[in-house]
Amino acid sequence: GCESLTSLVIPDSVVSIGHGAFRGCSSLTSLVIPDSVTSIGDCVFDGCKSLSSVVIPDSVTSIGKDAFYGCVSLSEIVIPSSVTSIGNRAFNKCDSLRSVVISDGVTSIWDSAFDGCDSLSEIVIPSSVTSIGKSAFRGCNSLSEIVIPSSVTSICDWAFWNCRSLSEIVIPSSVTSIGKGAFYVCDSLSEIVIPSSVTSIGDSAFYGCKFPDNLKQELIFRFGDKIFKQL
């Protein structure tokens, strides 16, 4: 809650940044995390509204839940390959976040990880990822396309809910399930190929998508009309 703190040097002796360490430091603009740090705890930068630049070193293996929640000035982030664990809502409500690179090492895109990142237009998902969590990209209105790697087996509930610019997505043959509301009101999405590997699609998964009638009928035949019904 140090609202006037604008800059800080973290010494090389620090190995962990604890729960809520800089929470509410609304004037903090940039920070360099030293190579000695291995973990970034829960809520560490929660509400750091002026934080526009942060470098996560290769030494970091875990990022806690809500770690960068509401960092509305943060425009890009690179998650190094050393990171294997990232908590829920880690980058939730980062309104200015435009570009995210997730390096090989991370195995899942966490629940609500980028929920409400209105400016996010580019994200690289590595081939190490096997699951896209609930509401992972919910409300990412600037995201127009995304490539899901062939390592992914499940797209969870609400994953791309209300991504209204999403017009292109490729679902690989590794995917076996698509959760309820996964592409709810993605009204720029007019074409999709659902591979034969997919055996279940949740209720309202494609409500509001502008599919042509022949595609819609094909999917209804395979999965039932529940996938197009409003919740």
Image (tube, rainbow, N blue to C red):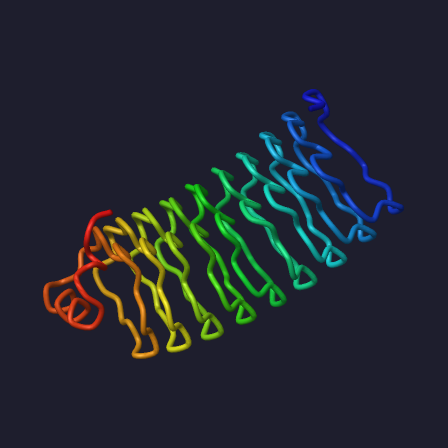
Quadrant for residue 171, please give it. bottom left
- Left-right relation of 204 to 77: left
Q: Residue at x 57, y 36 (%)?
A: 71
Point 36% across, 60% down: residue:
179
Direction from residue 90 to residue 22 in the image, left or right: right
Residue 166 is situated, as x and y percent measured from the top left of the image, at 32, 54
Spot occupied by residue 3 in the image (x, y as percentages of width and height): 68, 21
The N terminus lies in which quarter of the figure? top right
Q: Quadrant of residue 105?
A: bottom right
Question: Which residue appears farthest toward the left when viewing the image?
Answer: 213
Query: In this image, 100 relative to 11: left or right?
Result: left
Q: In this figure, what is the number of numbered marks?
A: 0
Q: Residue at x 64, y 38 (%)?
A: 43
Eyeballing the image, is 205 above or below 214?
above
Asked if 175 appears above or below 63 in the picture, the reply is: below
Where residue 197 appears, as percent x and y from the top left, is: 34, 78
Q: Residue furthest top?
A: 4
Q: Residue at (68%, 36%) from the top-left corner?
A: 30
Please tell me whether residue 169 is drawn above or below residue 16 in the rendered image. Answer: below
Q: Relative to residue 211, is residue 3 drawn left or right?
A: right
Q: Position of residue 192 (x, y in %)?
A: 26, 67
